[in-house]
Amino acid sequence: MRYFIDHDQGDSIRGWIVPDNPLAISRVVVSVDGRRVAEIPARFTDEVFKRNGWHATGQCTFMVSPDEVPGLPEIPRLELYDADTNVLVYRRVPPEGRVRLRTMLINTGIEPEAVLQAALFPHFQHCYFGVHKLPDEILTCVLTGPAAPSAFLSGAVTIPRYENFLTP
């Protein structure tokens, strides 16, 4: 799976998700305050995805608007997840109090640091726990996407896998 968010203009959020199955139509789930409020399928076709061999139909681009999510411009916090993998694709958070760093908590024990993760979650735009379980394609999207400057990652890691993302 690959993804990217083109924009969040308050009254619309546009992006694309290319699913692992080249025949599937991607779907994004909108969550507000931990409740899933909408599931929106990709409705735009992009020939570039077909030409690059990423997707058979190119139907991968979605648009979230007030039609699907009433009151969208007034919602300060919401999350978008890929419906098939449940991977966080985008998170809208207020700019005040947001940490503008990429931070990685390396879990060295058997149990993850759940209390610390929960405490830091509200302060970052994107948070990924169990990062060692993410495939390389998703990890590349996470670390190079537009929200990368405000990302908190946690998991058991092998540093060489991430070196090219962590250099200045």
Image (cartoon, rainbow, N blue to C red):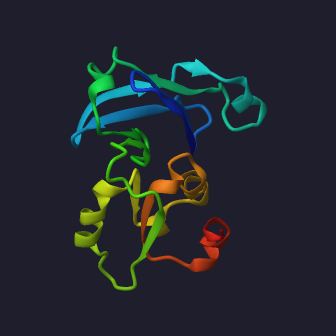
Q: Is residue 85 left or right of residue 144?
A: left
Image quadrant of residue 167?
Answer: bottom right
Image quarter in which the C terminus is found: bottom right
Looking at the rendered structure, the number of numbered marks drawn on it comes to 0
Say if residue 19 shows up in the picture. Answer: no
In this rendered view, identify the residue nearer to me: 21 or 100.
100
Q: Is residue 71 left or right of residue 104?
A: left
Up-down relation of residue 131 to residue 2 (above or below):
below
Identity of the residue drawn at 72% across and 24% down: 47
Give the x, y percent position of residue 78. 31, 38
Extreme residue toward the front, this view: 96
Identity of the residue drawn at 52% across and 28% down: 25
Q: Is residue 164 left or right of residue 159?
A: right
Q: Is residue 79 left or right of residue 146?
A: left
Up-down relation of residue 161 to residue 140 (above or below):
below
Image quadrant of residue 49?
Answer: top right
Give the x, y percent position of residue 114. 25, 70
In this rendered view, identify the residue nearer to me: 91 or 59.
91
Extreme residue toward the right, this view: 51
Extreme residue toward the bottom, this view: 109
In this rendered view, identify the residue nearer to me: 68 or 98.
98
Up-down relation of residue 56 to residue 3 (above or below):
above
Give the x, y percent position of residue 103. 45, 67
Identity of the residue drawn at 29% across and 79% down: 111
Identity of the residue drawn at 33% across and 83% down: 110
Say if residue 140 shows up in the picture. Answer: yes
Give the x, y percent position of residue 44. 57, 19
